[in-house]
Image: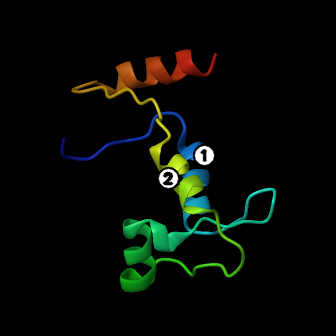
Amino acid sequence: MGGEYEVIDGLQRLHTITSFIETAFATLDDKYFDVAQFVTAKNRAEEDDAFSVAVGKTLASREVGAFLDYSISVSVMRGATDAEIDDVFARINT
């Protein structure tokens, strides 16, 4: 799959997941995501200087693995018109 995608619904959820990976906040038991266990995040933090890694307790490797392996449902609308996208968005939000 290639190309660009537009998020129709769930942008806040995706932002929260990304922010957690980027150590913007900790879990309820005060543990941060362990960036060292996720190569993509580690590279962004080191090479792109995209975010600063928080210092503190981190999730165990099995917890990081479980987080990264969690499935998220997505629907891809190929060739949809703006009207069709608006219709789907309206139905989702009712």
Answer few, some or many: residues within 10 Å of disc 1's Cα (few below 14, many 20 plus, some between 14 and 19): few
Please, is residue 18 above or below residue 2 in the view?
below
Front residue (pair 29, 78) = 29
Q: Is residue 59 left or right of residue 10?
A: right
How crowded is the residue under tag 2: few (<14 C-alpha within 10 Å), some, or many (20+)? few
Amino acid tagged 1? Gln
Q: Residue at x 72, y 65 (%)?
A: 31
Residue 19 in the image: above or below residue 70: below
Which residue is under mark 1?
Answer: 12
Asked whether the residues under the numbered discs 2 and 1 touch, taking CB atoms below 8 Å apart as contact, a structural biologist would say no
Residue 53 in percent (x, y) is at 58, 79
* Image point (45%, 17%), residue name: 87
Note whether 54 is above or below 90 in the view shown: below
Residue lying at 64% horizontally and 63% vertically, measured from the top left: 59
For marks 2 and 1, give the CA distance.
23 Å
Q: Residue furthest right?
A: 29
Q: Which residue is mark 2?
A: 65
Picture coordinates of residue 11, whole percent (x, y)? 54, 44
Mark 2 vs mark 1, foreground winner is 2
Q: Secondary structure at mark 1?
A: helix
Report which quarter residue 94 is drawn in.
top right
Residue at point 45%, 29% (across, down)? 73
Question: What is the quadrant of residue 30 in the picture?
Answer: bottom right
Where residue 33 sits in the image (x, y, percent)? 60, 65
Residue 38 sits above or below residue 52 on the image: above
Q: Is residue 85 left or right of residue 93?
A: left
Left or right: residue 77 versus residue 86 is: left
